[in-house]
Image (cartoon, coloured by chain):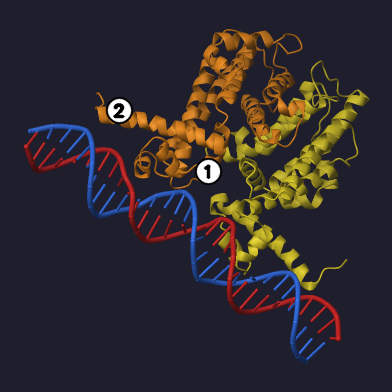
Chain colours: A orange, B yellow, C red, D blue
Amino acid sequence: MTLSPKQQEIRDREELLLDVAQRMLLERGYEELRMDKVAEAIGVSKGTVYQHFGSRDDLLAAVAARSAETRAALFERAQEFEGSPRERMGAVEAAAEVFFALFPHHEQAERLVRAAHLSPGISAERIATLETSTQRCFGVATRIATEAVASGDLPLREGQSVEQLCVGLWNLYQGAFLMRDLEKFMSDPAVDDAIGTLQRNARVFLDGFGWRPLSTEVDYTAARERTLTELFAAEAQAAGLL
Amino acid sequence: MTLSPKQQEIRDREELLLDVAQRMLLERGYEELRMDKVAEAIGVSKGTVYQHFGSRDDLLAAVAARSAETRAALFERAQEFEGSPRERMGAVEAAAEVFFALFPHHEQAERLVRAAHLSPGISAERIATLETSTQRCFGVATRIATEAVASGDLPLREGQSVEQLCVGLWNLYQGAFLMRDLEKFMSDPAVDDAIGTLQRNARVFLDGFGWRPLSTEVDYTAARERTLTELFAAEAQAAGLL
DNA sequence: TCATTTTTTGACGGATCGTCAAGAAGTCAC
DNA sequence: GTGACTTCTTGACGATCCGTCAAAAAATGA
């Protein structure tokens, strides 16, 4: 089943619209995301934009859903890293860093979508995509941690679970995103270098679970470097992490 | 210097307006926060609301600033807890839990304010209040951790700092707030019980730093109970934590 | 070539923000 | 209590932006 030229044009345009909206979101924020401006930016009329996205919120959700899918893909790629479970979890964390640097708009968009109390203007399909993408990320982390439990590297204590660990890492990661907004107000090395702090704190956190080998026994810096060069060369380059 | 009856009325009205705005924010979200409705809810006209708040964003910022001050006060109260440094940090965490339960609107409001890219409509004073309140919270945590370092309970390693630890706790705490939005989509014990997970993960995190006594050596549940009953009886009751 | 279907357009209705001049209410000296 | 002066309140108004829709334009296919 091939696409007619017109259908192809429409498909391409949707990507263009998302690119424009994403850029506006980053540069000007949600308040300044105007449907007229988005349309104008790619030389169509507003009505045409509404052919693609049911509402302004839907456009926002589409931007968030697209980057969320990219994130899930990065996480799944990180899963392929060759090494101990803990090193592989480190690779996932590196994937998070790459995404963090490449899609600075994402958290704001996702938060706004979730804050938009299931607005009727947002297509259910987009919400589902966003949701599935988040679950894929959790899935990757859960699998790695489960493996570590099985191999004896991760000795969970009474009342602890693999899910709790994954939620904790996710919280640290999300919190790091939020710190970026704080940078404008506070200046502190630990706040300023959000990525570095995230890295260090994730290590402390996993050490707290007793996930061997502990970061006091092994230097995980090398594994991180290897992850970036082997798995995310292009992306890390673009993000300025290499 | 006393206030004339009229001035007192105006002062009281400002609190009323904040109450109304806070409730609307919680029930309907930011999109549905209408200046007309806020005015109508307390029986004044829109122009009067603009006498208090320069813009819609300013009203939002005022709501956030007010609850941020409450949070700072709770944190400072927690600091008074009698016990080991680590127990006192646990008390701060309990204060965070209380706030978490009592002001569910707060994070959404604060995030929106910070996302509003220093909108010119927001009074600088309110931003300063919000900022100062956050720093007061960090100040409490920093003092306790610094004390723990001094007393030898908290053995920081090369490259680690008290600030890094505080940022980590803050991230876990902020992340827990965000999980609340996820609850609608994911159902998992660790996601569902955001507060419980935050508690457990904060302990793991501090254990990771080797902050003695470790949670494997001492049961901190008792200290938490004592914090809630001794310091936050009324609030914990209202929040349903007791 | 032309009838039919699909897509695009931009003017329009509706909603809300923030303003401001006119009017209402409060204050204060006497 | 009165009246002049100050402060506060009001709601209509201009401006902006969202989302719609009938008419126009473009694409399709026989």
Amino acid at the residue labelled 1: Glu
Where is B2 relative to A100, above or below? Answer: below
Amino acid at the residue labelled 2: Gln
* Residue B213 in sight here: yes
Is the residue under label 1 in contact with that under label 2 (CB below 8 Å)? no
Where is A224 relative to B96, above or below? Answer: above
Q: At x 54% / y 14%, what residue is drawn? A: A232
Task: Name the subunit of mark 2.
Answer: A
Marks 2 and 1 sit apart, C-alpha to C-alpha, by 30 Å
Residue B87 picture location, percent across and down: 85, 34
Residue B156 picture location, percent across and down: 83, 20
Answer few, some or many: residues within 10 Å of disc 1's Cα (few below 14, many 20 plus, some between 14 and 19).
Answer: few
Q: Which residue is mark 2?
A: A8
Secondary structure, mark 2, is: helix
For marks 2 and 1 on the same chain, the one whose residue lies earlier in the sequence: 2
* Residue B222 in sight here: no
Where on the picture, by quarter, is residue B4?
A: bottom right
Q: Which mark is residue A32?
A: 1
Answer few, some or many: residues within 10 Å of disc 2's Cα (few below 14, many 20 plus, some between 14 and 19).
Answer: few
* Front residue of B213 and A118: A118
